[in-house]
Image (tube, rainbow, N blue to C red):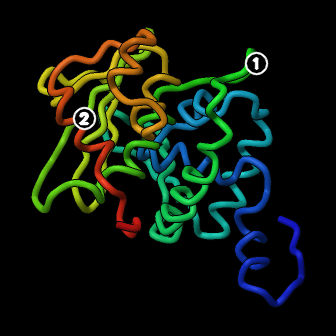
Amino acid sequence: MRSYQQFCSVARALDVVGDRWVLLIVRELMAMGPSRYSDLKRGLPGIATNLLAERLKVMEAEGLVERYEAPAPVGAVLFRLTESGRELEGVLLALTRWGLRRMTSGPGPRDAVQPQWMALLGGLELPGRLAPGAEVTVGIECGDEAMHVVLRPDGFEIRRGADADADVTLSGPAQLVGAVLSGLLTPAQAADAGLRITGARALLQELVDAAPPGAAV
């Protein structure tokens, strides 16, 4: 990676994560956990195969990701974030909040939309609003894809597949799922726009209505 050659913490950080695709690779690994190369390629529409390989190689050298051989029955090479890579969660949260204002018009005709991005939005934004010891599972079903995010006060976990025991499940266009989890739309407004909400809708409403940590009272 090129260096700005500036003795500044912002510049030094951007020396590592400022290249195109780097933070989106971090996004995918933070959302889906250890992933195959093919999983990352699928979650990063538009990236060239050789560029993904190059970015992963540099990110390994910089200590952001590591690769390892998964034991049977998986038996594949997986990539995962290192502790240093996971420390970028706060950066992604700040970018998530800042970027929401640019999503109010919905996706453009050429925009990719994937459900794990909406699940990550909820995982980054909502855990701090839970009461101590609470756990809430939100199912997300978009087209043929299903996943669920388990929210806890100290973090989150996104898992592939549906969860029949989810507290609440959101089914429909990913942009409507994201609008609810971000607070851009109320559950009722999203339902009127075509989102199907099953389970504890009142719990979902309480969660998105709760003030985020540090909010003014």
Image-based side of 133 in relation to 61, left or right: left
| Point 27% across, 55% down: residue | 129
- Relative to residue 147, is residue 143 depicted above or below? above
Whole-percent x, y for residue 197 in the image: 27, 18
| Tag nearer the camera, 1 or 2 | 2
- Relative to residue 110, is residue 73 depicted above or below? below
| Furthest residue in direction bottom, as rendered | 7
| Point 35% across, 34% down: residue | 74
Q: Secondary structure at mark 2?
A: helix
Marks 1 and 2, Cα distance to the nearest angstrom? Answer: 31 Å
- Relative to residue 195, is residue 187 depicted above or below? below
Q: Nearer the viewer, residue 212 or 134?
A: 212
Q: Which mark is residue 6?
A: none
In terms of sequence position, does the residue under pointer 1 or pointer 2 come before the other?
1
Q: Which residue position is annotated with label 1? A: 110
Whole-percent x, y for residue 37 in the image: 58, 37
| Point 43% across, 16% down: residue | 142
Crowd rating for badge 2 (residues with CA inside 10 Å; few <14, some 14–19, many 20+): many
Q: Which residue position is annotated with label 2? A: 204
Whole-percent x, y for residue 7 in the image: 82, 90
Quadrant housing the N terminus: bottom right
Residue type of the residue flagged with mark 2: Leu
Q: Nearer the viewer, residue 104 or 59?
A: 104
